[in-house]
Amino acid sequence: MGDNILEVEALKAYYQMSYFGVNREVRAVDGITMNVKRREVYGIAGESSSGKTSFIKVLAAAIRPPLRVIAGSATYDFGGKPTDVTVATPAEIDAIRWRHLSYIMQGSMSTLNPVRRIGRIFEDFAARPLGLSGSAFRQRVVEHLGHLKLPPSVLNAYPHELSGGMRQRVTIGLATVGKPDFIIADEPTTALDVVVQKDVLSLIKNLQTEMGSSIVFVTHDMSVHANIADRIGIIYAGRLVEEAPTRALFTAPKHPYSAHLVASLPRIGDTTQRPALEGRPPSLAAPPAGCRFHPRCPLAIDKCKTEAPPLLAVGPDHRSACWRAADVEPLVPGHGRVGVTA
Amino acid sequence: MSALLEVADVGKRFQMGGILGRQEVRAVDEVSFAIAADKPEIFTIIGESGSGKTTLARMILGLERPSSGRILFRGEPVHHENKADRLKFMANVQPVFQNPFEAFNPLKRVDRYLQSTARRYLGARDKAAIEAAMDGALQKVGLSLAEIAGRFPHELSGGQLQRVAIARALIPNPPLLIADEPVSMVDASLRMAIVNLLKALRDDFGVSVIYITHDLATAYYISDRLIIMQKGRVVEMGPARAVLDNPEHPYSQLLKASVLSADDAGAGNLKPANELLQFSNDRLSRADASRLEERADGRRVRV
């Protein structure tokens, strides 16, 4: 696998339910192929119900029914034997979890047990994977909290005694105390105030540089991606529609949906009319045929309604799944619709 | 100038703790502003969590009584003992809440909210009048009754649901909407639709909006005037563009410096503005002896 720490190959994960003889299938992840390099921050953007949470559930090896992996693989290389989490046994997953693969969760209030002190929560989560106990473990934790600018006294505090920013730093501390090679961060800063958000983001970035880990960073906020991600993948309705280095995605998007996401960002100092995308994200239980974006796409042609476009290279390190990728132009706010060339 | 809404030296104090160790929290401290009746505008209240912006909104809605100062709507206090007066006031000032998924009961069809609002505030009795009022309000937000009728909240996207919430608020034709973080729970691709809608309400239908947010970028985009609050106090207020282009108070500068910009995408610009944080904390510790000072461009800054 060489340079890649994670390789995802044509991954399909569906929610399959069967009640009273009625079968229902939600195609949450539908053929995603991507990889994450070592020491890379890979941003995943997508709106709610686009399947991004299901995708990272698979990456985090938290595949529980009704979510089932139908096809494809997600293989990690942490030095030894590569682990494909879609087929790995619980023992194999236990061996990588927390030491190599960890997860920063979204709501810090619901992640931390409200009736246990922070120190005990650290023991619950990390003592066994790290193989440490007693004062050795405590010392390791205190040292690690120092990196996150948290005083050792937080170990004696209950979650409700900490501010939102401190709690989020504790969750980041929990996820990173084992110095993992691969971190999945699911909207880690969404619930935070602007000042605290920037602080927490820079902490995550510093930790990542220091430990040399890779991060898959999930958020729907494009301005966060602009500042933390090295590469960005855009997920729409269960499929990866575009993948590019951050700068390229913001300056020269090659999919109408990403062009829209970038153009709709308001900026201080600019009051020109921003476009709003009409329509709603499709239901994954009955996605539209062909390209799943075509009902909302200003560039859609007949071919888009019947044939799904493959994810093809459109530039260095840049892939887009659009039949008309060559016609997509970055939108100048205030001038017509997304991607419409004059 | 006749004022639609006048907020004069309003303060709110909460008591915390028990009989021993009682503490007083000043959630809102001497806030004053007015919204003119003849000129619809988007008035933005910016602040982080704990700045008192939601408490201020609740007081304007008459859900909370100010500890000091007064709030007048068209010259009358917003707090009514009498149920009929209260109803009349509510028809004029309507709220839109943060999370549309929590604002609607998941077991209730969304059009029933619109129906009961029409029945209560417009006094409409027959089905045709109610439906006309519902459809009229939904048209204003870019939806129609045919799309919404019979739908449950889970069948609509967050953006659509938030638009329904705004349509519901518009049924009594209120001159003033209070929107508390209306876009923070809505996806990025739908966010601009809501923000543009608030703008259209002001420009096309003459509705004034009090827009409460922590997002400076959308505030810059739509608001006419704004106030920036820190721990219950107004630190800077004035014309939105002038203030945000060139904030004077250290806290306003800190907020602006903390906004993540997409302009230099990929550059990894994440350095926290620690110096400004220091300045603004210094100012906060001396805030008890401070006051608002007028500036030439119409803004007022706490010094």
Image: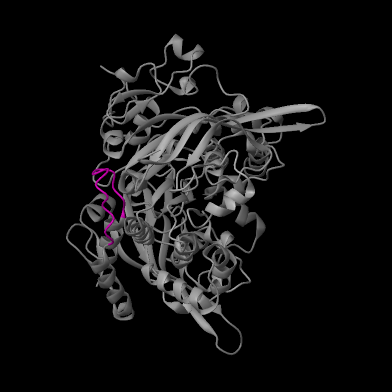
Q: Main secondary structure of the magenta part?
A: loop
Q: Picture coordinates of residue A310 (x, y %)? A: 43, 20
In the figure, residue B282 lies in which quadrant?
bottom left
- The percent coordinates of residue A168 (x first, y second) are 47, 62
Is residue B276 or residue B39 the one in the foreground? B276
x, y percent for residue A32: 49, 30
Which residue reaches farthest top?
A: A302
Can residue B117 be seen by looking at this rendering?
yes
Position of the C terminus of chain B, as image quadrant, is bottom left
What is the tally of numbered marks visible in this picture?
Answer: 0
- Residue B90 against residue A9 in the figure, above or below: below
Foreground residue, A176 or A269? A176
Image quarter in which the N terminus of chain B is found: bottom left
Q: Which residues are magenta?
A: B259-272
Q: Is residue B267 magenta?
A: yes
Q: Which quadrant of the structure image shows residue B106?
A: top right
Q: Would residue A27 appear left or right of A137 to someone viewing this image?
A: right
Q: How is the image coloured?
A: one colour
- From where the camera sits, is residue B36 visible? no
**Residue closer to the observer: A279 or A35:** A35
Residue at the left extreme of this rendering = B296
Left or right: B278, with A106 as reference point: left
Is residue A138 placed above or below A286 in the rendered structure? Answer: below
Residue sitting at x 57%, y 24%: A287
Q: Which residue, as the protein is rendered here, is positioned at the far bottom? A: B20
Q: Write the residue at 40% across / 73% down.
A: A143
